[in-house]
Amino acid sequence: MSWLLKLRHWQLFLMIILPAAWVSSSPLKEIINSLGLMILFLWLYAISYYGQGVRSALGLPIMRVSFFQFNFIYCLLYCLFQLYFSNKFEGLATLGTPYILLGLYSALAAFHVFGFTAKTLTSIIYRKEASFSEYIFTSFQLLFFIFGIWGLQPKINHSYTRNTL
């Protein structure tokens, strides 16, 4: 997965966005669309996973990775479930309270994944423990990844060559 951190910003952008522009029959389109989603999630995971090693090399404490991994897997599975089955079953919304609670937790888990990744990346860039005010902008860049890739990936490339992220 470290190869995702070495990509140029335009390469990563095309790998995430081009599958979303794929037009074909329904089953193939959903599979191709999930590739872009998987690359985005793997990019976030690679930043967080390899970033923890760099944090420890910088003398910073390692963050709670197990909760991040649980939320990461939950978000990924929930997004893939929605991508594949939302068109198949019209009655998904009629499942009621459990479906709503799973969706709410998915949103909270996604914010945790983006925040964890942003804090890890900001700590590596500034070489110190990042405060909320320092990593909030990076969080927005990750949330709006279409624009954020252009600013973040060059910083990741620089950190990768400097720290072997």
Image: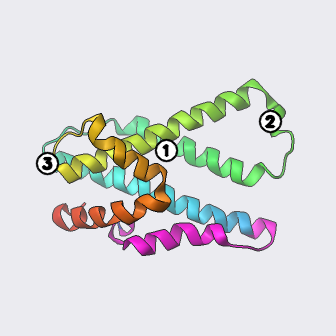
Q: CA distance from mark 1 to mark 2?
A: 23 Å
Q: Residue furthest left?
A: 59
Q: Residue at x 58, y 37 (%)?
A: 106
Question: Is 66 part of what is drawn in magenta?
Answer: no
Question: Which is nearer the eye, 154 or 15?
Answer: 154
Q: Residue at x 80, y 39 (%)?
A: 92
Mark 2 lies on a secondary structure that is: helix
Residue occupied by mark 2: 93
Q: Earlier in the sequence, mark 1 or mark 3?
A: 3
Which mark, by number, is residue 58?
A: 3
- Main SS of the magenta part reads helix
Instruction: Report the span colored magenta.
Output: 3-28
Residue 71 percent coordinates (x, y): 49, 39
Query: From what the image shows, is residue 13 above or below residue 110?
Result: below
Position of residue 68 in the picture relative to residue 134 (left or right): right
Residue 94 percent coordinates (x, y): 84, 32
Residue 45 percent coordinates (x, y): 42, 53
Answer with the quarter of the image where residue 91 lies: top right
Residue occupied by mark 1: 72
Q: Is residue 46 visible?
A: yes
Q: Residue furthest top?
A: 97
Q: CA distance from mark 2 to mark 3?
A: 47 Å
**Quadrant of image for the N terminus:** bottom left
| Three-letter residue code for mark 2 | Ala
Mark 1 crowd level (few <14, some 14–19, many ≥20, 10 Å Cα) = many
Question: Which is nearer the eye, 68 or 155?
Answer: 155
